[in-house]
Image (tube, grey):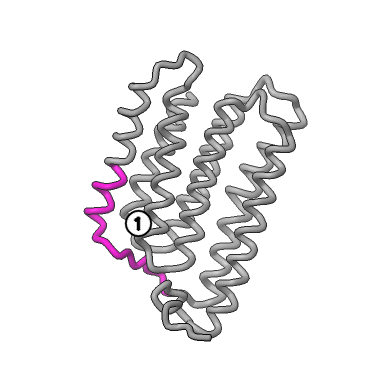
Amino acid sequence: MTNVLLIVFSMSLIYLSIANRLMSYVKIIAFQGILLFGVSFIELGEMNPLNLTFILLETVIFKTLAVPLFLNYVINRNAITREAEPYVPNFISLIIVTSIVVSTFLLSNTIEDSQLNKVYFVAALSALFTGLYIIGTRKKILTHVMGFLVIENGVFILSLAVGNEMPLLVNTGILLDLFITVLLLGIFVNKIGDVLGGGDVDQLRNLKD
C-alpha cells in the first residue's frame, strides 16, 4: 500500500508540470499532504507514539490544511492572476518531469543496497528535482514558494525511509524551517503585491535602489 501511495505521489508531480492555474498547484500540494499522511501512518506504525503523533499532525494540519489555506489567502489577498504563466510550454514540461521520474527510477536500479527502498528513493528525488524545475520555469513568485514545498515533501519522504529511527528534534526542525519560510515568503508576497500587483519574478528585475 505504501508503494502505491508513493507512485501516486510521483504521478502528482507529472500533473503539476502541466497545471495552468495556481489553485491547481494549491490542490496538488494539499493532495500530496494527504498521501504523505497515509505513508507516515502505514510506515511508522512501530515508531514512538509521541513522534508518530507529531508527524501525523504535521502532515494533516500543516501540509494538508494550513499551508494550502494560507496560499489561497495570499492569492485572494493580492488578486494574483490565476494563471501560473510558465516560461516553457506545458508539453515540454511534461516531457522534462516525466524524464526526471524515469531517470530517478533507472538510477535507483543501479544502486545495490538491500536497505534502500527504491520507491522512496524515486519519489523523493523526483520531488526534489521537480520542485527545482518549477522554481526555475514559473514566473509567479508564489509558484516558487510551491516549488519549495514540493522540495520539502521530497526531503520528508527521504526522512520517512528511516522514520523509525528519526528523532522528534529532526521533525521539529523540518516543521519550523518550513513554517518560517512560508510565513516570510507570504509576508513578502503580500507586501510586494501592494506595489507590483501580479507578483511576477520579471517585475523584480525592474526594482532599483
Residue 190 is covered by the magenta coloring: no
- Left or right: where does residue 103 sit relative to residue 184? left
Of residues 99 and 31, the one nearer the viewer is 99
Give the residue displayed 30% in from the left and 28% down from the top. Answer: 106
Task: Give the x, y percent position of residue 111.
Answer: 39, 21
Q: Which residues are magenta?
A: 81-98
Q: Quadrant of residue 67?
A: bottom right
- Left or right: where does residue 150 sit relative to residue 159? left
Give the residue displayed 27% in from the left and 40% down from the top. Answer: 99
Task: Give the x, y percent position of residue 181.
Answer: 62, 58
- Residue assigned mark 1: 19
- Left or right: where does residue 98 sit relative to residue 132? left
Is residue 129 placed above or below 42 in the rendered structure? below
Of residues 169 and 77, the one nearer the viewer is 169
**Secondary structure of the residue carrying numbered label 1:** loop
* Amino acid type of the residue that numbered disc 1 sits on in the rendered structure: Ala
